Image (cartoon, rainbow, N blue to C red):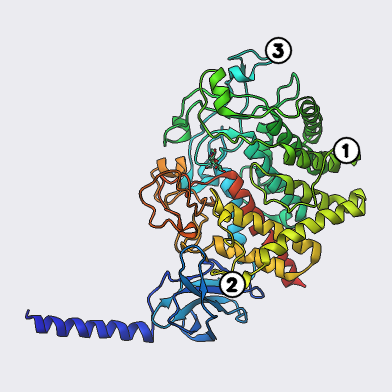
């Protein structure tokens, strides 16, 4: 073929394709970022378009190609991290249920998405189900786990007392039984501190939206008992936590762990010895808070779960007393390893400040008993800006509990108001300058949002905003919370939908041992990847950007940007289920 002929054929082919593209089916472009699952008929609907050359967009029916909306893009907005330009496409007035795409000439069309009621229900179910897949000491039969069925691992019925954890009744290498619980993350260890915030978040979700969970089925072995599935899931970890208290004195071990991380292998292939290590104040206070909150909730299920609420009450009181006697025993892994063998080099969760754990535990003990004695001597520091919850900062969990229980307990008005104002102030700060943000989300406004596990920052901001919405009834907070869910499901600088198994551009290679080792292409579903983290502490070589909002790689080596963890999944569950519950209520009014 001559070059001229080749050129002729090629250019005609090209012409044919471009004609086809513009007239019927534009190609999908990842330069259009939006929630890849969809939108509520009455909710805000936003897509973000990279670049500045276009001014118009359309929304088309994904099936027929019919234009249902024509709109103008916003003024350009610049990313404070990469300097890249975006424009916002707002199509909130499209309310009819259906499947659609957003199209921009010269760029292409978005992934398809739906507009419908209960649009995130499946995502809510999946993210709770994610915890089922994290269960230790049990097999996961196909009936519940589908193709991710697996054999039981880590029975944890012969756990050793580490030299750092000896007490009069429990000498070094004594054997205890401490089964169940959830694996913390991509690794197989079980950490009390991280279980604390995780359980607190899930229990709060139940307390804030109990009605919603009456009919919420996640297809787990307990689904047919008369306890809500969310609570059944929580109880799997609660029963493990109860075994982590030294019955002698009430102190709580920091974690149940291997000395070193297991390899990237399935749970049943792991045979390393496991230890419980050093009791400390922070683990004990987190435990106290969880036990008190559980007791409060489980009191109503005494017929189904005889004695469980009482066991939680006893455990919380004993833990509180231990903490009172040992107010600042901190866990410092390096120091511990200098004194005791074997060295423990798994996740540290070493928090150096117990003041927020005192606040949370005191709030829960007060809410459980109604006794203001528990609040004595504890400053709630409501004059300071409320810090966002994370594993080492749980003050806000105490605030949420004060707000949620104040009416029933007739808590002093002035105190409740101060706590409410602190939550509102935090939320107002988040909302400041939302109109200038390149993805029109409160998430990502400041660089510190892109911490290790940044997607949990987005989800926890969402929880605070939902609390602000409940206090004020002002829709702007709810809308911003939904914006952060949109962020997690695709409206972000990476273009990924971060919950495994959901969205069009999915995370496929999380740092998660079963997902790596099970030989199944798709990762275990319903798990939230950590998200952009410019720290890049894992030193993976596959990152393609160092900009804070883009610093993510879908590679299993990336434990700093692409691991999964229970304390990240829990706020994802809260955010999604809370929004579903609120939107359902609104649409039925
Ligand atoms: O989420 C934790 C993050 O805040 C810390 O910076 C990081 C390093 O210490 O550890 C993270 O937690 C990990 C834990 O130590 C072990 N299991 C996996 C957790 C998620 O990466």
Q: Can residue 37 be seen here?
A: yes
2 and 3 marks in contact (CB < 8 Å): no
Q: Which residue is mark 3?
A: 168
3 displayed left or right of 122: left
Compared with 119, 169 (above or below) is above
Residue 287 relative to residue 336: left or right:
right
Q: Quadrant of residue 104?
A: bottom left
Marks 1/2: CA distance?
44 Å
For marks 1 and 2, the one nearer the N-term is: 1
Earlier in the chain: of badge 3 and badge 1, it is 3
Instruction: Please tell me whether residue 317 is drawn above or below residue 429 in the rendered image.
Output: above
Packing grade of label 2 (10 A; few <14, some 14-19, many >=20) is some
Depth order, front residue of 18/25: 18
Numbered disc in front, either 3 or 1: 1
Q: Position of residue 205 (x, y in %)?
A: 72, 52
Q: Secondary structure at mark 3?
A: loop
Disc 2 to disc 3, C-alpha distance: 61 Å
Q: Identify the residue at the far left of this view.
A: 2
Mark 1 residue CB less than 8 A from any atom of ligand 1: no
Above-or-below relation of 476 to 556: below
> Which residue was labeled with disc 2?
436
Return the residue nearer the eye: 112 or 83.
83
- Front one among 38 and 567: 567
Q: Which mark is residue 306?
A: none
Residue of label 1: 376
Q: Is residue 76 left or right of residue 433?
A: left
**Where in the image, quadrant-wise, is ligand 1 located?**
top right
Q: Give how far across and how far down residue 310 sits, in percent.
A: 82, 33
x, y percent for residue 425? 75, 60
- 3D distance between C-alphas at marks 3 and 1: 32 Å
Q: Are marks 3 and 1 in contact (CB under 8 Å)?
A: no
């Amino acid at each position: 073929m001559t070059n001229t002929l080749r050129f002729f054929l090629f250019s005609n082919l090209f012409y044919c394709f471009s004609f086809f593209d513009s007239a019927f089916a534009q190609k999908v472009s990842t330069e259009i970022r939006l929630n890849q699952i969809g939108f509520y008929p009455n909710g805000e609907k936003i897509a973000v378009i990279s670049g500045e050359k276009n001014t118009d967009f359309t929304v088309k029916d994904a099936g027929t190609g019919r234009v249902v909306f024509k709109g103008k893009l916003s003024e350009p907005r610049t990313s404070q991290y990469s300097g890249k330009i975006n424009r916002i496409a707002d199509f909130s007035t499209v309310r009819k249920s259906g499947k659609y795409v957003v199209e921009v000439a010269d760029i292409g069309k978005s992934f398809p998405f739906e507009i419908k009621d209960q649009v995130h229900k499946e995502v809510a179910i999946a993210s709770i189900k994610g915890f089922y897949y994290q269960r230790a000491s049990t097999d996961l039969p196909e009936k519940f786990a589908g193709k991710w069925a697996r054999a039981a691992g880590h029975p944890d019925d012969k756990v050793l007392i580490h030299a750092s954890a000896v007490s009069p009744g429990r000498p070094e290498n004594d054997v205890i039984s401490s089964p169940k619980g959830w694996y913390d993350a991509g690794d197989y260890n079980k950490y009390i501190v991280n279980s604390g915030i995780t359980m607190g978040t899930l229990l709060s979700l139940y307390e804030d939206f109990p009605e919603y969970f009456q009919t919420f089925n996640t297809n787990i072995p307990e689904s047919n008992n008369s306890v809500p599935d969310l609570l059944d899931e929580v109880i799997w970890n609660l029963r493990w936590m109860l075994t982590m208290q030294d019955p002698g004195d009430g102190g709580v071990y920091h974690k149940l762990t291997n000395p070193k991380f297991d390899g990237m292998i399935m749970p049943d292939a792991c045979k390393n010895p496991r230890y419980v290590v050093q009791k400390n104040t922070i683990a004990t206070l987190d435990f106290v808070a969880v036990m008190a909150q559980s007791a409060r909730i489980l009191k109503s299920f005494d017929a189904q779960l005889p004695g469980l609420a009482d066991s939680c009450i006893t455990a919380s009181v004993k833990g509180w007393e231990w903490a009172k006697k040992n107010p600042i025993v901190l866990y410092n892994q390096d120091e511990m390893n200098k004194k005791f063998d074997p060295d423990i080099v798994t996740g540290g969760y070493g928090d150096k400040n117990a003041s927020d754990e005192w606040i949370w535990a005191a709030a829960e003990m007060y809410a459980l008993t109604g006794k203001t004695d528990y609040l004595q001597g504890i400053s709630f520091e409501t004059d300071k800006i409320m810090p966002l919850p994370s594993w080492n900062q749980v003050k806000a969990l105490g605030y949420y509990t004060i707000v949620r229980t104040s009416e029933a307990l007739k808590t002093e008005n002035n105190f409740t108001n101060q706590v409410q104002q602190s939550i509102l102030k935090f939320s107002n700060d988040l909302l400041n300058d939302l109109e200038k943000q390149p993805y029109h989300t409160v998430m990502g406004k400041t660089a510190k949002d892109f911490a290790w596990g940044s997607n949990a920052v987005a989800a926890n901001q969402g929880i605070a905003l939902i609390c602000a919405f409940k206090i004020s009834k002002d829709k702007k907070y709810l809308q911003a919370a939904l914006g952060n869910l949109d962020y997690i499901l695709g409206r972000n600088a990476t273009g990924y939908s971060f919950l495994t198994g959901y969205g069009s551009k999915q995370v496929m290679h999380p740092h998660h041992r079963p997902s790596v080792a099970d030989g199944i292409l798709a990762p275990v579903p319903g798990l939230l990847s950590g998200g952009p983290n410019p720290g890049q502490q894992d030193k993976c070589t596959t990152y393609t950007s160092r900009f804070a909002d883009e610093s993510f790689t879908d590679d299993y080596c990336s434990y700093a940007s692409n691991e999964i963890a229970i304390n990240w999944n829990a706020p994802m569950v809260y955010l999604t289920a809370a929004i579903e519950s609120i939107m359902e209520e609104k649409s039925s009014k």
